[in-house]
Amino acid sequence: MSGATKPTAEKPTAAAADKDTPDATTKPAAPLEEDDEFEDFPVEDWTEEESQIPGGTTHLWEESWDDDDTSEDFAVQLREELKKLGHSK
Amino acid sequence: MQEALVEFYTAHASSAAVAVARFLSPIPPSQNPGRLYDFLRTTNEVRVKGDVQYALQSQMRRHMSSDEINAWAEIISCYWRAVDRIVKAEQAENQGRSAERHALDTYDAWKDLTSNFIKYISNGALPHWTVFTLYFTANHLRKFALKADEQIAKAKPVAFSAGFQDDIVSATPRNEKLEEAARVFNRIFALCLGDRNPDWMTSRRWGVYCIANLQFKTYFKLKTISLSKNVVKSIAAQSDLPQFHLYPASHRVTYMYYIGVISFLQEDYPKAEASLTEAWNTCYAYSTRNHELIMSYLIPCRLITEHAVPTKKLLDQFPQLRSLFGDLINSIRKGDLSGFDKALAEGEPEFVKRRIFLTLERSRDIALRNLFRKVFLAAGFEDLKEGQTEKDRIRKSRIPLSHFAAALRMSTAGADSGQVIDDEEVECLLANMIYKGHMKGYVSHEHAMVVLNKKGAFPRTGV
């Protein structure tokens, strides 16, 4: 950066300084984007709070399989079927 | 002209890269749709360079070096020419004339702008923060390249189709402009990564990740994903980059997404899971599409690493994900093999397009595990012995092979369909489940019996 005479911004990144400005240059992505291309974000930077989906669930993954419903059709059918086979023990 | 540049002066005075990028945008802001036309009318092709130079000189003499004034004069003139091509292309489109030449002209003009930008950053005429402005300019170049390639393909649709032998020839130049743009991005990447300025506050290395993201997007489009690995390697080899968490969130999330997808495609699922999870947690709350994209890889990934399925709540929140995975996940949950096969077959074109088909196919094991688990549950409990309570009743752990076979027949084709599943096949499937750690126990071939562990027969499922 030898030739630059401007005093440097006190923030480490200039982009960070702009974080509250929704950026018109990136917004209308329109028909070019498809398949699995990651979209440009409307802002450059954001806080941790702004990464929380409002009303979003934090319960992302089924933690157990304990909610087995032994009265569901298949389970009933299966027991019937197995009864026919008898318990060979 | 002076009036048209006011926006630039203000943006430049606060070193605001994004604001300068907005001034140099090829898309007019929604509140001022005529902006490009207005800017175009401030001068003409012959006078543009002189006009811009004069305006900058009289306004910015005291704020900029003469090198920087010259650089901006050149860049803004290039921008003016690009705007000229964009407006002409728009007019041609409105009149229904062929768009091919105009798309190419626009691309060329924008490439000229980008190249000049690179030139003046690398010779030090422009301050370090302009790499972010350059990023936006380069991102537009990528979009213009896509448009140009699309128009080229449209203009010569079946030129070679008469001779089958020429098929390859006609397929190769399809992404000519995007490939060219990829080389421009390589130069920008090198410009950022190679900055030897020891003061990290004013380093161009802050641009490394956003330019890398641009390269990933391009390589994915060109179907040369393996080239992304070079980018990742160069970044990993650079020991003096600023710490990752100090970069703007948009750079980090996009980078983590692509690292995740690249690891996923290399079947490095633990790494993919870690990267995608980080991207998910940091992603901007209102970017729904990006959330969906992250999950579309994270769901297949976690099926493999953790045998975990997403909650109904999560799928309800993202209807796109529900329509993509809903049936498949339900079948896995229920241990419904024919449902699983059906959902996989129906989703195949979409799954293949997203490069997740092969991974999802492997999750059939989990559906099978859940089915076998149902057999185990159906067997019920041993009779209570003395001193035992309901709480510590023990499930029957010796289960005849024939029971598993019956369940399998029911789940694949219905109990009476007559489809044959050999007992040997059942035994083999069971042995495999045990080998893969989905079940704990052993198969007694002699007694045609499966003996399961009394505790934790189906790890991580609660029984």
Image: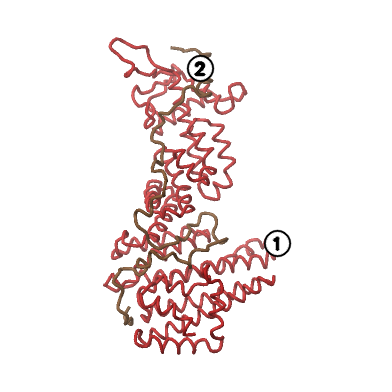
* Residue B60 horizontal/vertical position (percent): 38, 85
Callout 1 secondary element:
loop
Pointer 1 local density, CA inside 10 Å: few below 14, some 14–19, many at least 20: few
The answer for which chain carries disc 1 is B
Q: Chain of mark 2?
A: A
**Amino acid type at mark 1:** Ser
Separation of residues labelled 1 and 2 (CA atoms): 61 Å
Q: Colour of chain B?
A: red
**Few, some or many C-alpha atoms within 10 Å of disc 2 (few <14, some 14-19, many ≥20)?**
some
Q: How many marks?
A: 2
The label on residue B371 is: none
Q: Nearer the viewer, residue B290 or B151?
A: B290
Colour mapping used in the image: by chain
Q: Are marks 1 and 2 in contact (CB under 8 Å)?
A: no
Residue at numbered disc 1: B161
Position of B46 with respect to B55 (left or right) is: right
Looking at the picture, which amino acid does disc 2 mark?
Answer: Leu
Q: Which residue is mark 2?
A: A82
The chain in brown? A
| Residue B383 % position (x, y) | 37, 11
Q: Which callout, 1 or 2, points to the residue nearer the camera?
A: 2
**From the viewer's perspective, is residue B225 above or below residue A77?**
below
In percent of the image, x 39 and y 28: which residue is there?
B458
B70 versus B329 height, above or below: below
Both on one chain, marks 1 and 2?
no
Residue A81 on image: x %, y %: 53, 17
**Vertical comparison of B437 with B403: above or below:** below
